[in-house]
Image (cartoon, rainbow, N blue to C red):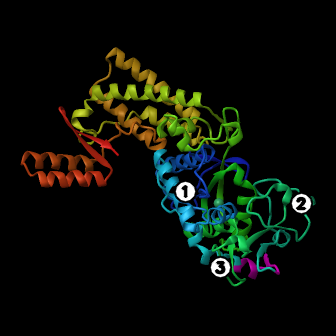
Amino acid sequence: MGLKFFNTLSRSVQEFVPLDPAGKRVGMYCCGPTVYDFAHIGNWRTFVFGDLVRRFLEFKGYSVQHVMNITDVEDKIIKRVHETKTSLREFTGQYEAAFFEDLTTLNCAMPHQTPRASEYIPAIISLIEKLIVRGLAYKTADGSVYFSIEKYRGCGCQYGQLVKLNFDEMRAGERVKNDEYAKESLADFALWKSRVPEDGAVFWSSPWGEGRPGWHIECSAMSMKLLGPSFDLHLGGEDLMFPHHEDEIAQSEGAALQRDGQRFVKYWLHGAFLLVEGRKMSKSLGNFFTLRDLLAKGFTGREIRYLLLTAHYRETFNFTLEGLQGARTALARVDECLTKLREVAGVEVKLVNKTRLEEEDSRLVTAFTAKLDDDLNVAGGWGVIFEWVRDTNRRLNDYTLTPETAEAAIKAWTKIDSVLGIADQNQIEIPAEIVALLEDRQAARKARDFKRADAIRDELKAKGWVIEDTPKGPKLKKL
Ligand SMILES: [Zn+2]
């Protein structure tokens, strides 16, 4: 069975067929963080969802180019830069660094490219110029540039593909300058905003005078620059459908860079909202959590990731502290089962990659894959996993598992975990290259070449592994 996603563009579940004629390469763009504060748990739900999509595509054998932008020029940022009297780079740099740190805490794979809007100004200007040439954008007296929805619709293009819009409410030529606006303010939106005193030092020169880009054009310019005018997947939270993604489509397809019959994006995937303790997150209700707030309460990135991955991405999810406790219990069950399997398989002593490869426990992998193929049905996937844990525990209790079958079960779990990324970091499989280095170090120590042994230890550390020398011999731990 093939992979299927719910495509917001068609409002239906569709089979995933990449644009690449060879069916191998996949271009995926996820709207990244606006770096004016720490990302909250609602934001993290979207980013972990993006990570799941990427990991599952890779698991399916696709070669994914994952791009996530860093929005470092935008209304809220400029306001904060002005208030804090810092430079743009200084202000956004601290939140950008925190974002990457949090991304690692949640064990999300690093996107292949993380373009900053401030470094793509020439691409943004060139895209705006194309829209002006095509008659879809116009300059106003103050030196700003707006996208004309009327002209766009006049060309036979549809504005309002992801959300339904009421054009009766729209007054031709009315403009909205803010980066974020409601459906009711259906109006021409800003591509380039002319410089005002509050912008301080945040401005660039352009053919229309000094100013800065609007938020929406940034994503159009960066995504097309890195992935081409047509790419496979565009992800984001459902709050971005309008105006952000709707405007991205209008700008990108308005510039008409796509080949005949191709769209800017083939599949639009949107993650649903997150409630915290049953209510919309708000600072005044005391249910507003950044990742750091939850870590300070003693929860781990692993527990938070697990909880975020228990619900289907299109369902509103109620995130609770009780749920995090439940995550801890569920993970302990998986860990306990895996520990016992390792004992039976004897992998602790032999080190996983050195043992002969047993056939994977294909039933587990096949059943899990079938669930995720179905528009990422993670709840079904967990059902399969916990049934497997129950079954494995029963076989462990019966002493019916041989070292070979135990090892095959571990292999199957490891394969599945390449999608979920929730394995205990202390128990994950050690790559062959790392095992070889460990062996070299043991040999160096035996030969009393401590200089070389230390050098290898440093090399391992640089690759993210630390050695702990125990009475039973050296153990490797992932940093
Ligand atoms: Zn975006």
Q: For this view, does 336 lie left or right of residue 233?
A: left
Queried whether the magenta region covers residue 131, the answer comes back as yes
Kindly state the secondary structure of the residue where label 2 is placed: helix
Q: Quadrant of ligand 1?
A: bottom right
Residue at the location (68% across, 44% down)?
A: 272
Cα–Cα gap, marks 2 and 3: 29 Å
Q: Are marks 2 and 3 in contact (CB under 8 Å)?
A: no
Q: Are marks 1 and 3 in contact (CB under 8 Å)?
A: no
Task: Give the SS element for disc 1.
Answer: helix
Mark 3 neighbour density, 10 Å: few (under 14) some (14–19) many (20 or more): some
> In terms of image quadrants, where is residue 389?
top left
- Residue at 25% x, 55% y is 459
Q: Amino acid at mark 2?
A: Phe
Which quadrant would the N terminus be assigned to in this image?
top right
Say which of 56 and 3 sits in front: 56
Q: Is residue 357 left or right of residue 389?
A: left
> In the image, residue 311 lies at what x, y percent?
61, 36
Is residue 140 covered in magenta?
Answer: yes
User: In the image, is residue 59 above or below residue 352?
Assistant: below
Q: Which mark is residue 126?
A: 3
Amino acid carrying label 3: it is Ser
The reply to whether discs 1 and 2 touch (Cβ–Cβ < 8 Å) is: no
